[in-house]
Amino acid sequence: MTTFDPAPFVDRLAAYPAALVAACSVVSAPDGRWNPPDSPPTAHGPAWSIAQIALHLLLEEREDFRPRVFSTLADPLAPWPPIDPERSVHERWGAEGGVPLSSILDDFARERDESVRRLRALGPDADWSRTHTPRRPPPLSAGQLLACWAAHDALHLRQIAKRLHQLAARDAAGAFPGSGDLGYAGSL
């Protein structure tokens, strides 16, 4: 069995805010709040806009991955507080279209900096094999949670890329009679 090395995951977590800002920088404020009508809705409302995806990442940073990794490292038997990520985004988004994307990204970067600082402060004695058994199995080790945290980032970067593709299709719709699709660009 190989020893788990948290360093590559922590490095990815540290670098992610810059990638997120870069991906989001190509949209206007209204496009950042656009909900694609052709995507499957979430359990609590329409498919997420780019700003809602960023809000989800912020909430997951504060309420899911960071607290659960550190809880598992400290006491794997301690219960985790329940979360509902989709409901949280829709409840906190609000009727007015939420807060500006730039504010969400700033808050996310601050929270992620705190997470990375705390992870790097753990040092080599952290036992990443400590395992928590949530109410819904499977059991998860602290190392698995850290790897899932980095993978979760990548998943939502892909989701943002899909929204950018959908925005291009929306903006080109009807502009090119006889060849209205964007197939030449490739598909996601």
Image (cartoon, grey):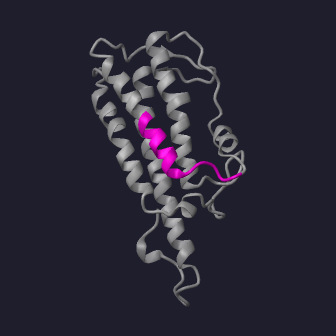
Residue placed at 51% from the left, 86% from the top? 179
Region rendered in magenta: 96-110
Taking the image as shown, residue 6 lies to the left or right of residue 104, namely left
Nearest the eye: 44 or 28? 28
Residue furthest bottom in the image? 178
Q: Is residue 70 above or below residue 10?
A: above
Q: Position of residue 173 (x, y in %)?
A: 57, 79
What kind of secondary structure does the magenta stretch mostly adopt? helix
Nearest the eye: 29 or 77? 29
Taking the image as shown, residue 92 lies to the left or right of residue 72, namely right
**Which corner quadrant of the image does residue 37 belong to?**
bottom right
Nearest the eye: 140 or 101? 101
Residue placed at 46% from the left, 58% from the top? 161
Q: Is residue 133 above or below residue 55?
A: above
Q: Position of residue 143 (x, y in %)?
A: 39, 23
Residue 98 part of the magenta segment: yes
Q: Position of residue 53 (x, y in %)?
A: 54, 48
Please tell me how many numbered marks the rendered image carries. 0
Residue 171 part of the magenta segment: no
For the N terminus, the image quarter is top left
Residue placed at 54% from the left, 60% from the top? 29
